[in-house]
Image (cartoon, helix red, strand yellow):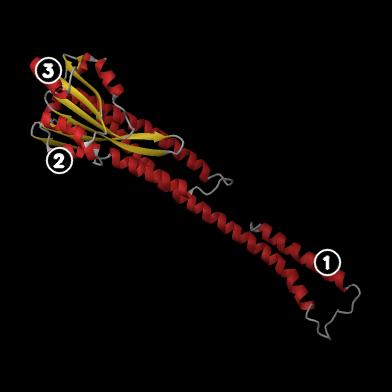
C-alpha cells in the first residue's frame, strides 16, 4: 500500500491531490522538484501503476515486489535501483529480524518500497522535511537519509548483540548456570544474519563515495560519513563472530572439565566402596577351613579394618584433588 506521497520543491513539501499520475504531471509542470512515493509491501497490481508511470525496468520492479534481494546498487537506463537490508532487534528473544528497503532513484522522483518491520521511513521523511537545505539536493537526499537511518540502526543492533554476548560469557563461567550451548549457536546464527545484511552494503557506499554514481555527486560527503559508520559496524560484527567462537570453545572446554571432574568423583567413590566389598567378598566365600572365622572379635575387627582402609583411600584421593 502507499504509505505517503508528496512533491518536494526547493526543500518544501507539497501534498499531492489525486492519484500518482497526477502527482508526476504536477511535478513535471513545476520543474526543479521531485516526487517521493513511499510504499509498504505492495502487491504486483498495486505497483504496476508506479512501474508504468516511471517506465521502471521489469526486473527491478519484480525485485521490489517479491523482495529477498541482497544489498546492491544497479542502474537501469536513467534510474538507480538500490536495495538495503533493515534490521529489527527483539529484546525478549535476542532475535534479529531482517527486512528490506528498496529505492528507485531518478532525476525527479524517488520511490521507496519497504518490506518487513525494520526501520519505518516516517521519521526519515519528517527529518528531511525539517532540513530544507538537505532536501534541496534533490532525490539523492532521500537516498542519503534512508541509508543513514539504516546504518545508524545497525549500530544499535550491534550494541544489543554485544550485551547478549557479555551475558553469555557470564553464564559460561558460572558453575551454577545451565548448559548454554544452544544459546551460543542461536546468537551466532543471528550474528551471521546480521553480517549478510550489512557487509554487502560496504561496496555499494564505496561506489558512491568514489564518485562512480553521478546522481550522488552533491551528497558524496554525506555518504562518506555513512561509510565510516558502516565500516565501524562491520568491524564490530566480525569481532562479535570471533568472540562467539571463543565463547563456544571455552564453554566446550569447561563442559569437558566438569565431566572429567564428575568421572573422577564417581571413580573415587567406586574405589572406596571396592575396599569393603573385597573384604566382605573374601569372608563371604564360606569355606570350612578359613582362618579367623571362629573369632569372637572377628566381625567388629573386620568393620574396623574396613573403616580404616576406606579412610586411608578417601584421604589419598582427597589430597590428590579427586574428591
Q: Kindly identify which numbered label has been placed on residue 304.
A: 1
- Left/right placement of residue 88 relative to residue 62 reads right
- Residue displayed at 66% across by 62% down: 268
- Residue displayed at 56% across by 44% down: 174
- Left/right placement of residue 4 relative to residue 176 reads left
Label 2: few (<14), some (14–19) or many (≥20) C-alpha neighbours in 10 Å: few
Q: Quadrant of the C terminus?
A: bottom right
Label 1: few (<14), some (14–19) or many (≥20) C-alpha neighbours in 10 Å: few
Q: Which-is-in-front pick, marks 2 and 1?
A: 2
Q: Which residue is mark 2?
A: 59
Q: Quadrant of the N terminus?
A: top left
When the figure is inspected, residue 172 is found, relative to residue 319, above or below; the finding is: above
Q: Which-is-in-front pick, marks 1 and 3?
A: 3
- Residue 160 picture quarter: top left
When the figure is inspected, residue 163 is found, relative to residue 132, above or below; the finding is: below
C-alpha gap between disc 1 and disc 3 = 107 Å
- Regarding residue 212, the answer to whether it shows in the image is no
Q: Which residue is mark 3?
A: 26
C-alpha gap between disc 2 and disc 1 = 91 Å
Badge 2 marks a residue whose secondary structure is helix
In the rendered image, residue 298, in percent from the top left (x then y), is placed at 87, 74
Amino acid at each position: 500500500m502507499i504509505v505517503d506521497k508528496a512533491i518536494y520543491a526547493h526543500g518544501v513539501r507539497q501534498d499531492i491531490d489525486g492519484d500518482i499520475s497526477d502527482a508526476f504531471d504536477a511535478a513535471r509542470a513545476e520543474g526543479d522538484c521531485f516526487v517521493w512515493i513511499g510504499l509498504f509491501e505492495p502487491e504486483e497490481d498495486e505497483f504496476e501503476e508506479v512501474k508504468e508511470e516511471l517506465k521502471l525496468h521489469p526486473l527491478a520492479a519484480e525485485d521490489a515486489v517479491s523482495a529477498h534481494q541482497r544489498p546492491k546498487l544497479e542502474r537501469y537506463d536513467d534510474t538507480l535501483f538500490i536495495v538495503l537490508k533493515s534490521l529489527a532487534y527483539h529484546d525478549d528473544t535476542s532475535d534479529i529480524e531482517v527486512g528490506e528497503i528498496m529505492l528507485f532513484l531518478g532525476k525527479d522522483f524517488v520511490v521507496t518500497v519497504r518490506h518487513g518491520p525494520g526501520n519505518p521511513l516516517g521519521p526519515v521523511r519528517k527529518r528531511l522535511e525539517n532540513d530544507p537545505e538537505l532536501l534541496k539536493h534533490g532525490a539523492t537526499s532521500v537516498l542519503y537519509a534512508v541509508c543513514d537511518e539504516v546504518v545508524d540502526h545497525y549500530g544499535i543492533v550491534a550494541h544489543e548483540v554485544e550485551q547478549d554476548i557479555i551475558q553469555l560469557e557470564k553464564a559460561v563461567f558460572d558453575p551454577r548456570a545451565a548448559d548454554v550451548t544452544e544459546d551460543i549457536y542461536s546468537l551466532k546464527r543471528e550474528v551471521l544474519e546480521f553480517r549478510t545484511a550489512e557487509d554487502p552494503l560496504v561496496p555499494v557506499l564505496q561506489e558512491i563515495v568514489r564518485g562512480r554514481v553521478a546522481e550522488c555527486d552533491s551528497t558524496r560527503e554525506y555518504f562518506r560519513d555513512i561509510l565510516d559508520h558502516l565500516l565501524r559496524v562491520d568491524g564490530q560484527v566480525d569481532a562479535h563472530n570471533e568472540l562467539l567462537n571463543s565463547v563456544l570453545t571455552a564453554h566446550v572446554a569447561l563442559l569437558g572439565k566438569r565431566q572429567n571432574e564428575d568421572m573422577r568423583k564417581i571413580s573415587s567413590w567406586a574405589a572406596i566402596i571396592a575396599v569393603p566389598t573385597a573384604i566382605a567378598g573374601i569372608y563371604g566365600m564360606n569355606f570350612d577351613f578359613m582362618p579367623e572365622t571362629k573369632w569372637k572379635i572377628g566381625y567388629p575387627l573386620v568393620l574396623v579394618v574396613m573403616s580404616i582402609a576406606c579412610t586411608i583411600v578417601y584421604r589419598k584421593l582427597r589430597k590428590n584433588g579427586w574428591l
